[in-house]
Image (cartoon, rainbow, N blue to C red):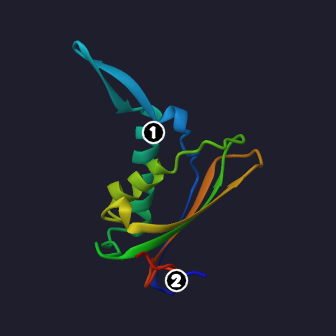
Amino acid sequence: MSGSVLNPSFSIEIDLAPVAKGNRYRIVRYGKRYGIKESVEAESFKNATAMLILAKMGGAPSPFSKQDKLRMTCYVRHESYRPDLDLGCLKDALQKSGLIHNDRQIRIEHNEIEDKKGPGRIRLKLERVASLPWKVS
């Protein structure tokens, strides 16, 4: 059973393949110590996705406030079958574009990954949820 959904919602189709978990981070050296940094692939995916979202919004402010609880429905087709896709980069891009204020706003997440080969594509829908379908005690 799902929570009741109120408007507004936001939908977009992105013709980019998401990043695999193994390619999201890389180890870098800072002088004598090592650190972890986002990979070039993850950073470019995040920047390109944020620009596409900003173009779709057309300069309008985000339809969601900081207090909104959101449901994210995501359909993904990758260039080849990858069970280890990292949709955290997609949430980071949503936050970078200003569509959401924090990725913790996404309380319900539904992801479907197609097994077909073909060009990478993401179909994303964000909706405001009035109440969660369960009660936390």
- Horizontal arrangement in the rendering, residue 121 relative to residue 61 (left or right): right
Which residue of the protein is positioned furthest toward the left in this rendering? 31
In this view, which residue lies farthest toward the right?
116
Q: Is residue 40 above or below residue 18?
A: above
Q: Residue 65: which quarter of the image?
A: bottom left
Sequence-first disc among 2 and 1? 2
Circle 2 sits in a helix, a strand or a loop, which is it? loop
Return the mark for residue 3.
Answer: 2
The amino acid marked with disc number 2 is: Gly
Q: Residues within 10 Å of mark 2 (few under 14, many from 20)?
A: some
Q: Residue furthest front?
A: 137
- Residue visible at 51% across and 32% down? 23
Q: Are marks 2 and 1 in contact (CB under 8 Å)?
A: no
Name the residue rendered at 47%, 36% in the picture: 24
Give above or below for 39 relative to 58.
above
The image shows residue 55 at horizontal and vertical percentages of: 41, 61
x, y percentage for residue 41?
A: 47, 35
Q: On the image, numbered disc 1 is attached to which residue?
A: 42
Image quadrant holding the C terminus, namely bottom left
- Residue 46: percent from the left, percent from the top? 42, 46
Q: Amino acid at mark 1?
A: Ala
Frontmost residue, 130 versus 16: 130
